[in-house]
Image (cartoon, rainbow, N blue to C red):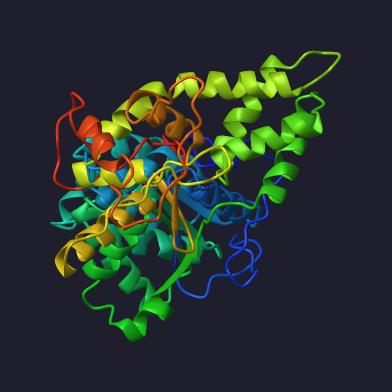
Amino acid sequence: MGSGTRDGRANDSDSYRIRRTDGSGRSIYLADRPASAPTVIFTGAPGMGKSYALAHAADAARANGDLVLRIDAGSRERLEKRLARAVQDQYDELAQTNGDRLLSDIGRVVDRLLGDRGGWAEKAMSALAPVLQRAISWWEAPAKPTLTGLVDRLGELAQHRNQRLLLTIDNLGPSQASDLADVAALAEHLESAGRPVRLVVGASGPAVDALLTADQHGAAAKIGTRYDIRDCAPVPDAELRRALLAHLHRQGAAVRAEAATRLVHEANGDPGQLMALAGHAAALADSPRGVSRAVAEEAIRVKRDADQWAYRAGWAGLSDDARVIVTSALTTAKGVALTEPPVPSDARAWVDRAGTVAGLVDSGVLRRTGDRLTISDPGFQQWISTNIAPPPARSAGRKPAPRSRSSAEPQPSTRSRTTRATTAPTRQRKRVVAGPARGAGRG
């Protein structure tokens, strides 16, 4: 549920679809609720199911007979070049049409983008009608092909075939300035072009903020008509439990009630985390007893052990201020905060802290519930408690002193924890960046 396959299709094992709703109780899936704008954005913290939502939309479009193309955003090459490669990969599907002129136009653009004149031409000469062979004029390719221009030609081809085009762009990040500008330009074009094209994007919260900022022509009044933004929020425990039971049933593994409760608690609203835990539990299950509480605990241990380097990298990527905030979010097994967060000294410090907290929430390190912050991944909390900021040791046979509320008494050990945390052998950074990558490889 946390991801699709590499080609953008939902995993076969995900026949049970987790019910995802927005704050108004409406389904976030495009198959259930049609888009209200030409561009749909699924946003949320890592692991919250953005990639799965895109894959589900693609599957529904294919079932409807539509043309579907999928690309990933990234810093290595621009989106239009990635789309050109996707067009090459799906050439046989595109060639099933009488739109020879349209295909030749697309061929010229793809050839120009990839700088591979022989590749597309060889396919065209062997597969297309003679009229298309004569129509291909490589020197007529646009001087500067753009993402919008290529999508527009693909949309014209889909329209010629009485189809719709669905283009999905996953993993859009806030630092990819060229990608953000290209998506903003394409969204503006689709709003008025009238092509049968739907753009579906998976993006983090900061990326959405950056995208709307990059869309300089998208005045506030037009945001609602240009973008349909859907939040992939944490999944309620009851729904995760149903998904877990369905997944383990497909694996032929029975599960005890207390084991299911423990696994769902460890997933903490993250569907991708739940599926990873379910996979470990199914592999460890005893044939006669199925998934017991002991098996669930072992599955959690295996998952946490596998994530140790992700935890280390996540901690190393946090600024000093972010580390202080994260350690102040540590809780006991009963959810009681171990320390109080530091109080900013002035208005500027309040603003800086708010920005750091927002970055930690957007990256999935922290979870905000009302005015309370907690660490999203119980495994990451355990790693911090064990390796960075363990709770103060108590003397044997001595009861802990009651916690005083007097302002004269020193605050709990935030300072000592902060000192220990900031002296860890990691490179310091001024700003908070992505945390422990719970959703690495997942949307």
Residue 384 image position (x, y, % from top left): 38, 31
Residue 191 versus residue 339 in the image, above or below: below
> Depth check: 158 or 226 in front?
226
Query: Is residue 229 shown left or right of residue 80?
Result: right
* Residue at image location 19% in from the left, 55% down from the top: 177
* Residue at image location 76% in from the left, 22% down from the top: 292
Residue 64 image position (x, y, % from top left): 64, 57
Q: Residue furthest toward the right?
A: 288
* Residue at image location 54% in from the left, 45% down from the top: 335
Q: Residue furthest toward the bottom?
A: 221
Query: Is residue 99 shown left or right of residue 299?
Result: left
Query: Is residue 320 shown left or right of residue 60?
Result: left
Q: Quadrant of the N terminus?
A: top right
Query: Does any portion of residue 135 appear in the rendered image?
Result: no
Number of marks in the rendered image: 0
The quarter of the displayed image where residue 206 is located:
bottom left
Residue 158 image position (x, y, % from top left): 48, 61
> Depth check: 337 or 376 in front?
337
* Residue at image location 20% in from the left, 41% down from the top: 320
Residue 310 image position (x, y, % from top left): 37, 28
> Depth check: 277 or 304 in front?
304
> Depth check: 155 or 36 in front?
36
Query: Does any portion of residue 14 appear in the rendered image?
Result: yes
The quarter of the displayed image where residue 221 is located:
bottom left
